[in-house]
Amino acid sequence: MNAARKSIARGIVVETVSPTELLQVLNGACSPDQAQIMASGDRLKQMLDMFGIFDSLQDVATQRELPLPIRQQAIIQFTRAAPNHWKSRKLLSDDQRIRIRRRSMVFLDEEDDSIANFNKLSVSKIARQDYPNNWPTLLNDLLNVIDSNLQKRYSSILEDLQNTLVLRRSLQLLNAILKEFAGMKMLNGIKTMGNIAEQLRFVLYGYYSRMASTFTATTLTPQTIDSQRIFDDILLSHLVYKCIVKMAVWIWNRMDKLSLEERQSYQSWLEDLFRNTAVQIKSLTELRKTIVISLGDGLPNQSSRTIKALTKHIRSMGKFFRRMQQLSHQRFVLLPTCGDIILYLWSQVVEATSGPQELIGDSDEVAYPLVFLVQGMVLFKDNLAQWSEVRKSGVHNINSLSQDFVENAVRLLVTRFMPLNSTDLENWMADPEEWANTEGKEDDQWEFEIRPCSERVLVQLSNQFPRFVIPLLQTTFQQVARKSNLSSFCSLRLLFASIAQPPTDLASVVQKEALYCAIGRCAIRMKDAIPFDEWLEHTLVIEARDTNPNYPILKRRIAWLIGKWVSESCTSPNNPQIWATLMHLLQDRGTGSDAVVRFTAATALRECIDTIDFSPNVFAPFLPTATSELVRLIGEAETLESKRRVDATLNTVIERSDSHITPFMAIIAEPLPHLWTTAGEDWLLKGSLLVTVTKLVEAVKSESTTLGGIVVPLIRESLSPEGTAHLDEDGLALWLSALRNTITISAVNGAPALKDIFPRAITLLASNLDLLGKITSIIESYFLLDAPDILKSHATELFQAFLAALKSDAVTLNMKDMIISLSLLVQVSPPALWGEAMHTSGLFNHLLMNLVEGEGNSLFLAEHIYLFSRMVVADRQLFLQLISAASATTSQKEAYLYNGLLDQWWGKFDNMSEARHRKLAAMGIASLVSTGRPEVLERLSGEIFNIWLDVFGEVKEALAEATIPEDSEWVASHLVSRQFRNVIPSLPLASPTSLKRYWELDEPLGAYYQGSEGTPEYERRKVVYECDPVRTTQLNVYVSARLREAEGICGPGLFESFLKTTDPTVLKQIQDALLQT
């Protein structure tokens, strides 16, 4: 039985691991019996919470007499858990930590790579936490091992395998530690890394200098390349170099944060490292090339291993240059011999094209590996600015590249690296969809692939040397366009003589495709040099319709070219020839076309449509073909990624075509259910399909009412338990769009109705805080469509959901939006439908107590007052009943509730900034006055008169044809002396047109419409706004009528008593305001 150990945390008892049981469990985990593996795995999870488990696991891993699988399982479990719980006092004691640190060095001569690698990973993560405070000897211990074994290695001519193994493990561990500390961002970690770099940079640099000195033309030869010692020397040198590079890059990135003295010291070291690396990469590249060419094909295994190791080492030098260039291009170009080494690497690209094709390949064993050439191209591309003709200052650059150099570079790129090669064409034929998808990704992969990289180099050449590149491409284009002989144009005669005539053979087609690619990549520079519309009409249109079986290569590039020129605003999209050509390429399924052409045409279509100058009217004649063919292509696509890409084009077509898409609504909608079903769990495709339906709904607007048969099921699916984690936002966007654009929530033609899914909105309102804002907007849309119907069916549940959301931890903005939604509901529905449910749900009680107790910021509480104002204006007796019921439910006296309500009404009045809100509050308080409640009338002479006077002074209104009450003389003569004893006659309410509102803005604030512009909901909101009693009621008439009602309830004597303390000046101002017309 395991012993128990009491944790420092009081009351917690932690079991201590049993080494014997642990060994049994690890043995079971490596058993061939699946049941035993499962049982052992479960027990091992439990044991990972035992005291001493990490010490025991590492101890098992060190016992080399145990079976290897058990040791591997032990080190794996240790590495996965120990670093994350290294500070735990429940699982580890200080003595155990010391043993673990010391024991980790035992693995430096471990023969099993997996065990050594896991140890390397765990030590680096523990070092991150312990070095230098708790593990101060770590680096010194490692350096001692490395130093002693290096001395032993280079002092003997005999190969010692154990010595090599220890060196390899030690350097790999040191590299992992440096990588860990180089990635630290906190100040202590940065300081520690600085100390490490200061301690190690010269030491490791000395090691590498000594080791690299053995790489000479006499030691690295075709005869010695199969030597194990040569391989080990290269490998160990590479590991040392990686450590140096990690420190160098870290220092380089922090140069501007160093003191002047530190910067000078580090700059000198970095320049020396860069200079020697430049020398070394040249030397090793030439040695490697000589050896590979000499040995030819079919390298022996050991020779192959050595060549691969050497290639990897050379590539790491190029990576070092590239990383420095990325971190600070400005400082990079100032490094000594920088320009020379970049031009040398470019010279290797040039040299590679002058030899046999088989010397270039995607392999480490050829003379010119593609990865090496790409590396040189990338460095060359990003360094071209330093050789441009004119510097940024406007001064002529004396170090500029010559015209011959630039033209030769263009020739080389377009003839050798930009054309599709045999591998490209084989991949095209093997899997057209995948090939098209890969080609369509304009991402950072260009830094690692020769053809995309060469295209970017050409673009940069055209940017830095437009005086050379653009005329070159222009002249070539003109010669090809005229189909004349190019022999007189010496710079490119070898390139383009073969394609001056319409190409028919595969080689000529491929070469012409490269030229079109060049023109497309340089579109911005070429737009003034090439008459694109003429070229399109006389050449591209013809080639796009050619049935030559090799022409899919050219047609695909034509589609891409059109998309590139239009999307970069180099030609207008409103050219019918553009659309006719793309439509042909999109629908052509005959000889001379294929799936790649169609998918590329679909992408180009999206790029052309999604431009500022796009005209739906010009595109309208091509819309039937575009929609039907895109829907067809989605169905034909075999991969989900292809379906998504084509669907993205369809979405753009729908969005930009606007109402023109309406006649084709059924064509788009009909196949969507099948596409949805076949998408399975490809949530990205399903999300794209939801966007498609959303765009369609937004485009056809009120016509979308007939789409309930597809909209409602898709909303249900997207918000189902399986789909909500992936599709909730897209589903809610479709839901909101459908509501804003429909004209009814009832069923149409027997299809599912939008009102059928309203219960789901109620559930989401109560439970989904993340999307509460969107859900509130959806519920508002329901209110605007048919609030009475919603309340008849769901009033109580709806208000309970509002209550749950208001009681949650939702952000204040969402809380405020919910109160605004309730205000809208009160405004557009009869009080009889919401009054009782407000009470039974507990919502009114919550809102009232929230306001009375002042729970929330001022703007949030002001929204409560607007809501209560609308309620009391709509039905003051119902409002009194709600307060009375709240008094009974909350066990608070009515007087307390009224006084708290009125305190907030007065206290938050200054927080009401909009004139219509202040008028609403004034109308609400007037309705409360009309109830005759003594708590209200007691404040009439003070707070309430002040509110009215404030609003009267701000809100200037008049009837178009003024109506004067017949007994206005009574008002003048009795207001002061008789205190409203007689009846004040009512004035007729004004209509929105007859009441002139001097206080009102031309339009409500944009937030009122909530982004519904251009939809039927916008008109619904506008009607609600136009018919708002705040706009249709003249305030002074309304107030005078409410005062009369209050006097009628109280009686003249009692009513007069409430006005005794009123300042005469205030009464005179009230009198004047009420009589104003």
Image (cartoon, helix red, strand yellow):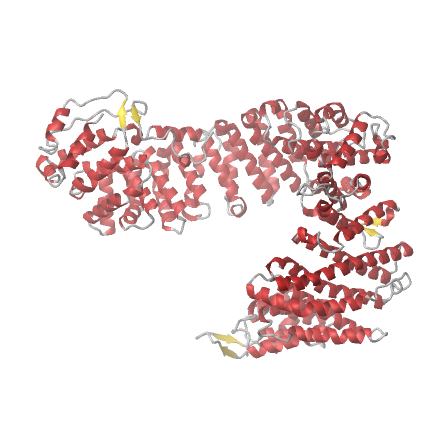
Which quadrant of the figure contains the C terminus? top left
Q: Is residue 358 left or right of residue 385?
A: right
Q: Is residue 1070 left or right of residue 39?
A: left
- Confirm whether residue 549 shows in the render: yes
Residue 103, image x, y percentages: 65, 76
Q: Is residue 617 left or right of residue 277?
A: left
Q: Residue at x 75, y 73 (%)?
A: 166
Task: Name the foreground residue: 848 vs 384.
Answer: 384
Q: Residue at x 71, y 64 (%)?
A: 244
Which quadrant of the figure contains the N terminus? bottom right
Task: Name the foreground residue: 467 vs 1045.
Answer: 467
Residue 139, image x, y percentages: 66, 72
Residue 989, image x, y percentages: 25, 26
Q: How many marks?
A: 0
- Confirm whether residue 841 shows in the render: no
Quarter of the image where one finds residue 668: top right
Residue 932, image x, y percentages: 16, 38
Quarter of the image where one finds residue 71: bottom right
